């Protein structure tokens, strides 16, 4: 079973340009990716049971309902009934009381706003409430429970460390030992390498990928999902992805990174950790 959850939605709309009613290409791409990831997770839940939770875990994930919230919901429903039955002033008093008991409730505010005037729930008053939240508080949340989107700037932070053992999704550029169109074991980086076998010295800047079957790589970035593992081996990479599988499409940000990395970076890149150093050393000269 699953607890109630947002259907792959994000908070990126809070950065919308209110004059043109448009979002940046980056925000649109992340929003669409979150929606697709959620749909994929629901499909997997229905067909295979993946992401299902035991009843006690699902119950623990439910939002906590305090006595104040419970009373607010009851008063709000009473207020709606009173308005529907010709007792608008009494209904408004009940809904005002409900709002006072649970001022954080967006659902009650928007339902009450549309009772005043159709369209008010998405009008200027709504956007004033949105802007009061502050753009800086936008959070990249997992697009669905059990599937977490990681970004390269997450590596080396508590977010990447706490993801250990979770199913994650991220985009990057694959690097193989030798030129090949497919592989079941390769490295992935935020930007393409300037030459074959050239990897960052920073062990936090590379992810080692393991797949159950060869994945088609091509010449550009890929998006993969799998089980995230955080390692403590000082001679290896910090992060690994196991059971990796390809997902369609990559974010625009990844494509921009590729374009910006056309210059050779060999002077800034050095020997890889021991686990890969011996493999690259044994590569034939070309």
Image (cartoon, helix red, strand yellow):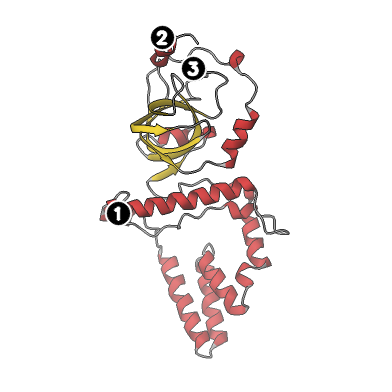
| Residue 66 % position (x, y) | 41, 63
> Which residue is pictured at 56% across the width and 70% down the height?
110
| Label 3 environment density (alpha carbons within 10 Å; few <14, some 14–19, many ≥20) | many
> Which residue is pictured at 50% across the width and 66% down the height?
102
Dot 3 and dot 1 residues touching (CB under 8 Å):
no
Give the mark nearer the N terminus: 3 vs 1.
Answer: 1
| Label 2 environment density (alpha carbons within 10 Å; few <14, some 14–19, many ≥20) | few
Q: State the separation of the CA atoms marked 1 and 2.
A: 45 Å
Q: Nearer the viewer, mark 1 or mark 2?
A: 2
> Which residue is pictured at 40% across the width and 66% down the height?
67
Question: In this orientation, which residue lies closer to the viewer: 116 or 96?
Answer: 116
Q: Secondary structure at mark 1?
A: helix
Give the mark nearer the N terminus: 2 vs 3.
Answer: 3
Q: Which residue is mark 3?
A: 197
Question: Farthest right residue?
Answer: 19
Q: Secondary structure at mark 3?
A: loop
Whether residue 136 is visible to the viewer of this picture, yes or no, is no
Q: Which residue is mark 1?
A: 47
| Residue 138 % position (x, y) | 57, 48
Q: State the separation of the CA atoms marked 3 and 1.
A: 40 Å
| Label 1 environment density (alpha carbons within 10 Å; few <14, some 14–19, many ≥20) | few
| Residue 80 % position (x, y) | 50, 81
Q: Which residue is mark 2?
A: 282
């Amino acid at each position: 079973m699953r607890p109630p959850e947002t259907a792959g939605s994000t908070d990126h709309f809070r950065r919308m340009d209110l004059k043109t009613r448009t979002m940046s290409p980056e925000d649109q791409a992340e929003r669409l990716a979150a929606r697709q990831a959620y749909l994929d997770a629901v499909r997997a839940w229905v067909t295979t049971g993946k992401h299902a939770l035991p009843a006690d875990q699902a119950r623990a994930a439910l939002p906590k309902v305090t006595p104040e919230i419970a009373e607010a919901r009851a008063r709000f429903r009473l207020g709606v009934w009173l308005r529907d039955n010709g007792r608008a002033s009494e209904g408004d008093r009940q809904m005002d009381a409900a709002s006072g008991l649970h001022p954080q409730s967006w659902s009650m505010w928007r339902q009450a706003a549309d009772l005043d005037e159709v369209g008010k729930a998405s009008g200027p008053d709504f956007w004033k409430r949105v802007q009061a939240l502050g753009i800086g508080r936008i959070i990249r949340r997992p697009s669905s429970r059990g599937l977490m989107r990681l970004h390269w700037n997450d590596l080396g932070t508590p977010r990447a460390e706490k993801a250990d053992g979770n199913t994650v999704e991220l985009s990057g550029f694959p690097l193989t030992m030798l030129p090949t169109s497919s592989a079941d074991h390769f490295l992935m980086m935020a930007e393409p390498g300037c030459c074959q076998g050239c990897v960052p010295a920073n062990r936090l800047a590379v992810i080692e990928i393991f797949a159950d079957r060869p994945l088609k790589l091509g010449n550009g970035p890929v998006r993969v999902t799998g089980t995230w593992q955080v390692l403590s081996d000082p001679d290896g990479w910090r992060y690994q992805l196991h059971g990796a599988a390809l997902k369609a499409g990559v974010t625009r940000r990844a494509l921009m990174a590729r374009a910006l990395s056309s210059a050779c970076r060999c002077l800034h890149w050095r020997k890889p950790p021991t686990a890969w150093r011996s493999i690259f050393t044994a590569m034939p000269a070309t």
